[in-house]
Image (cartoon, rainbow, N blue to C red):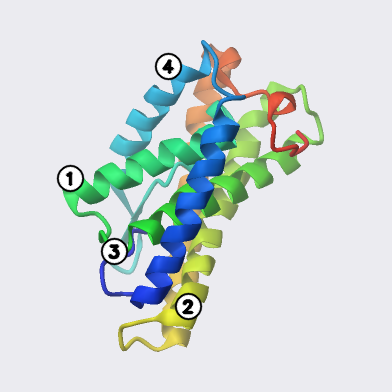
Amino acid sequence: MHVPDGFLSLPVSAATGVVAVAAVGVALRGARRELDERTAPLAGLVATFVFAAQMVNFPVGAGTSGHLIGGALAAVLVGPWTATLVLTVVTVVQALLFADGGLTALGTNVLLLAVVAVWVGWAGAALVRRFAPRARRLVPLAGAVGAFLGVPAAALVFTVLYAVGGAVPVPLAALAGTMLGVHTLIGIGEAVITFGVLAAVVASRPDLVHVPDRDPAGVPA
């Protein structure tokens, strides 16, 4: 889900840019309370993994493919504030180096991928972990649920933005059906990948999982 140039009107693109900049500014402050000797190097590794994983597409049917967003995965490993920064860096680098998403739509893409996907994913994962806050065996399932919810949530927000200021002759109903349907399938793929990665992490290095109780966002574990 990388919005190209010209898909949304300039006022909507500018507005999402302002929101994205504000969100990143808040995330910079929040990440100070998440980053420590463990999470600082891990954030770099997570950014590298997400960047590489987003370059690999998987089929979702009918000639359509998708790729990992990694919002929930990053949030579970390094916390939601740091994950917002990680996905922002990945999104900006992809736009500048690979033209993956337009430059005028950069704010929109940061909003969708680094804010919506991360925070909906984090909230979904936190909700599952409330059943057993200290049970790390729930971490893969929690991350998978968050991943499944975060992807279609980002698609839904994009659909709303298009309804407000779409700039191409695509009927809203057709776009909404395609976006939500395809990204629900992509969400399933993202959930499977997230579950697998987190299961491997929990099995080998459970200390790398972010402890929600330390999180300044106040989201219960």
Q: Nearer the viewer, residue 25 or 185?
A: 25
Q: Nearer the viewer, mark 3 or mark 1?
A: 3
Cα separation, mark 3 vs mark 4, equals 31 Å
Q: Marks 4 and 2, Cα distance to the nearest angstrom?
A: 39 Å
Mark 3 lies on a secondary structure that is: loop
Residue at 75% x, 33% y: name it. 221
Which residue is at the front of the view, 3 or 59? 3
Classify mark 4: helix, strand or loop: helix
- Sequence-earlier tag: 2 or 3: 3
Q: Residue type at mark 2?
A: Ala
Could you classify mark 4 by the number of other residues whose Cα lies within 10 Å: few (under 14), some (14-19), or many (20 or more)?
Answer: few
Q: Earlier in the sequence, mark 4 or mark 2?
A: 4
Q: Is 132 left or right of 24, judged from the image as shown?
A: right
Q: Is mark 4 in CB contact (under 8 Å) with mark 2?
A: no
Inter-mark Cα distance, 2 to 3: 22 Å
- How much space separates mark 4 and mark 1, taking CA atoms? 23 Å
**What residue is disc 1 on?**
97
Residue density around tag 3, few if under 14, some if 14–19, many if 20 or more, within 10 Å: some
Q: Amino acid at mark 3?
A: Thr
Q: Are marks 2 and 3 in contact (CB under 8 Å)?
A: no
The residue carrying mark 3 is 104
Is residue 75 at least partly visible in the picture?
no
Asked if residue 91 lies left or right of residue 172, the reply is left
Question: SS of the residue at dot 1?
Answer: helix
Q: Earlier in the sequence, mark 3 or mark 4?
A: 4
Q: Which residue is mark 4?
A: 41
Q: Which residue is mark 2?
A: 176
Direction from residue 42 to residue 26 in the image, left or right = right
